[in-house]
Structure formats: structure tokens, C-alpha cells
Image: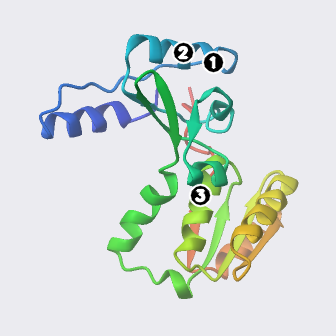
Amino acid sequence: IAHSLSPMMQTFAFQQRHLDCVYLPFLVAPERLATAVAGAVALGVCGFNVTIPHKEAIMAHLDDIAPAARAIGAVNTVQVQDGKTMGYNTDGEGFLQPLHALQLPFRTTTTCMLGAGGAARAVAMALLAAGCPVLVLANRTYERAAHLVAILQGHFPQAQVRAVPLAQAAPAARQSGLLINATSVGLHDAS
């Protein structure tokens, strides 16, 4: 999380709305996730975000999960209210928002997505819900991409969704009007 610009951006947004809030990053080891959630609740934190590698694992530690996040299988935002935690996923909505501003024609755009993790699931579901007719998934683990395809086809049977091995990502991308990087490439500090 050391690379994240979220603390700066979110704190600025709080200040612009005159909210007495601060956004702080905390590095949480996977084996400490349950303790971190309990600690946030105990401290009276009103909410927090979750990033890789915790988007899927956190679901087991929450009191409730919004239906869309449950369908996606990943949570990136947790609200804490009255000592109870509620998980949401805003990845898809957040991804589509600037594309709507560009008036991208989702209903006629073939899309190639690299990655098959929690963010990829959220973005894929949002794209398909927006009418994307063809979605090609490429992931370094083909089986994970194929599993995501099966999930997506269950929710969006009208769409053409398929997985390709990562080695076939370049040809799939050349045949697409939109290429999405939903991998962790670039998220980690190179030092």
C-alpha cells in the first residue's frame, strides 16, 4: 500500500467537504486480517477500504455483504456502523464512471481484460451489466480466468465471455476496442 495515492486523494476530498476525517494506510499481513477488522471496529473507525491481497479473504470476517459484492466475490469498501461491518464493492462503478464521461459505447465495444482477481470480477460484471457484448479474459493462470468466465456466464448468459491463455492476450487485445489491465502489475514498488 506504500504506492497508494488514496490517503492524499481521500483526505483532500474530506477537506473539500469540511468533514473531520482522515484517511490512513495500514499494511495488514494476511494472517492478521481478522484482528485488523476487529481492531477497526473496536477503535470506532467508520469505514475502510481493502486492496489486494485481501479483497476476497475479508468477506469471511464481515457481518454482512451487499448482494453485488457477494455476486462479485470481493469487497473493497467496508462500512462500520453500530459495531457491525458491511462489505461493498465499488471497483466496477468506479471504473465505469470516467468511461461514461467519454461516452464509450459499451453496447458495441468488444473488451479484452487482463486479470481475473477481485477487481477484474467487479469490472467485468459492471461492463457486462452496461451491455458489453464480448468480453475476453486473459490471466497468467488460465484456470482462474475460465472459472471467472463460468461465473460471468451465469449472471450474463446473453454476453459472449471467454477465457484465453495469457500468451493469446495480444491478439485478443488487437481485436478489441477496449483493453483493461486488472492485474497487480505496476502496483508494487519496484525497489
**How much space separates mark 3 and mark 2, taking CA atoms?**
33 Å
**Residue behind mark 3:** 181
| Amino acid type at image mark 3 | Asn
| Residue sitting nearer the eye, 104 or 81 | 81
| Picture residue at 62% right of the left edge, 64% below the top | 124
Residue 172 vertical placement versus 2 (above, below): below
Q: Residue at x 15, y 34 (%)?
A: 15
The residue singled out by tag 1 in the image is 34
Would you identify the image quadrant in which residue 186 lies? top right
| Residue furthest bottom as drawn | 108
| Callout 2 amino acid | Ala
According to the image, what is the colour scheme of the structure?
rainbow
Q: In this view, does 102 lie above or below 29?
A: below
- Near mark 2 (Cα within 10 A), the count class, few <14, some 14-19 or many ≥20, is some
Q: Earlier in the sequence, mark 3 or mark 1?
A: 1
Total numbered labels: 3
Residue to which mark 2 is pinned: 38
Mark 3 vs mark 2: in front: 2
Q: Is residue 36 left or right of residue 137?
A: left
Residue 108 lies, with reference to residue 17, above or below; the image says below
